[in-house]
Amino acid sequence: MGADMSGRGVIRRAVAGQRRDVAVGSLLGAAHQTGEALVPVLIGLIVDRAVVRPDGGALALWLVVLAVVYAMLSYGFRFGARAGERAAEQAAHQLRLDVVRWVLAPHGGAEAGRPPGALVNVATEDARRVGALNMALTLGIAAVVGVIAGAVLLLRASVPLGLLVLIGAPVLMALGHYLARPLEHRSEAEQERAAHASGVAADLVAGVRVLKGLRAESAAVARYRSTSQASREANVRAARAAALQTGLMLTLTGAFIALVALVGGRLVLSGSIGLGALVSAVGLALFLPGPIAVLAWVGAELAKARASAARIADVLAAPGETTGGTTEPAAPSAGELRLHGLGHAGLHGIDLTVRPGEHLGIVVTDTAHAATLLHCLARRCDPDRGHVELDGTPVTELAPAALRSALLVAEHDAQLFDGTLLDNVTAAAPAGADPQPAMDAAAVDEVAATLPGGTAGRIGERGSSLSGGQRQRVALARALAADRPVLVVHDPTTAVDAATEARIATGIRRARTGRTTVLVTSSPALLAATDRVVLIDGGTITAEAPHDDLVRDHPVYRTAVLT
């Protein structure tokens, strides 16, 4: 990622990355605009040399020249527009990749404070708007050439007309830039509102079953209606600003062309220019509004692109949840996990060693403390005191991506993805690995039996076609199939019946033989299958023993797992 995370930096990268296509498109576009400007001049020459003084040979010659010019401008438009469009799409694609890569980066943080819908809006519509600037730039450069070509040709026909255009066109361009400023602010507000509406919609769709269960459909509809209304109003305000800017520019352009026509008419009446020159001047006067209007449109596109670039820059500049760490873990990893004096958000002085290949259970009486422990192990945050080690190396020294390749923390609220059941299970599995043992361990065969197509059956977005217990089993199978040296699983069976839970407890033990496994849970079935259990009560370790011994001897533990 580049060092410049400002909106201007985003625009510079989007343009610089496609400079070749922009250059080609601009060159061909300039050829098209030059050809357009030459057409009225050639018609004027035909009038002077073949019509006023009839000459069949001259007429044929100039008609051939006119046909060649038409072929040139047609070719320039076709292939210039293709190069500009390619530059726009490729830049938008690269920006989408940048945003998605940053959101999915191992250090995390880009998604903090932003609903998924807002990030989707940034990665799609905002990226499209910034990418479209390449097309606007291609057409804008061609339009400038067209204005200059028209002015030069007018100067050849009449110096006063040429000077009028040379002075008036830059003034119009400056006015267009000035008039585009309100549109930039309105466009930014429009995108913010649209992103918020997308975020609300995504949240409501994700929770539609809960809303129906609570019979809160009317409240959800009212919430989205309010958000959508605000987005619509922001969109209307932006459209009004765009319409005002375009209308004013058309008015100013029309007045400018009327002035050119007036001056040209007076020159004809005074005899300063002939009939052919008059035809050329009128044709050029009619031609010039085109490139000038394009310049006004470019100003509007630049305003939109700057607003969207600022939003993309905010995402790309988001600080990660964790920083530092460049060391690669030992290969192969032994799987030894140690916590030294760990203290953070309610946890105090946690000293714990998980031996390589051990099957450890952890019972935490406070759910907030369990979440804190998992965040520290996954390095979603670094503890205030103490540290976590993997195979003798502090995790703060390990590169985030390398850490996650050795240590997987499967949280309780892990999400599934739209696709087949098998695709979800194998999402993080090593290439060529057999997923069947993981599916057997998590009792996913029963889930597959309920789907048309079995493991090839689609489970819907976030596993919407599955029950809560089925989603848990698929998520657990995915964690097991990843086959990490160290696996930490949080409450994988809270929505599973007792018989299936007992089967899963045995399956996890079998699938993770020789691999370090930590189960943060209060399930007696899962804890009974561990080598030992650690009890964290009040933020500190208060007991450590096999499950059966703790159930017999420790009242707090007995209450935590049996009630």
Image: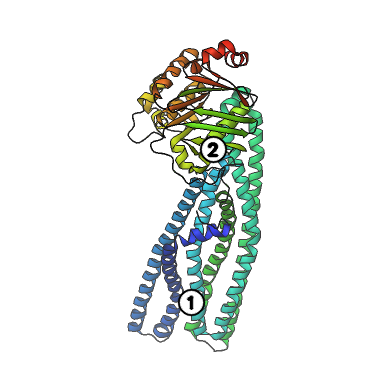
Q: Looking at this view, is 70 or 516 the one in front?
A: 516
Residue 455: which disc? Answer: none
* Residue 515 vertical placement versus 71 (above, below): above
- Residue farthest bottom in this picture: 271
Q: Quadrant of the C terminus?
A: top right
| Residue that badge 2 annotates | 379
State the residue in front, 267 or 406: 406
Image point (47%, 64%), residue name: 138
Colour logic = rainbow
Whether residue 299 sits left or right of residue 326 in the image: it is: right
Q: Residues within 10 Å of mark 1 (few under 14, many from 20)?
A: many
**Residue 527's spot in the image, x, y percent?**
50, 18
Q: Which percent across, then down, holds residue 429?
A: 39, 33
Q: Relative to 498, say whether 490 is above or below.
A: below
Residue placed most toward the observer, 67 or 170: 170
Circle 2: element type: loop
Compute the Cα span from label 2 to label 1: 62 Å
- The residue most toward the top is 552
Residue 439 against residue 322 in the figure, above or below: above
Residue 235's place in the image compared with 177, above or below, is above
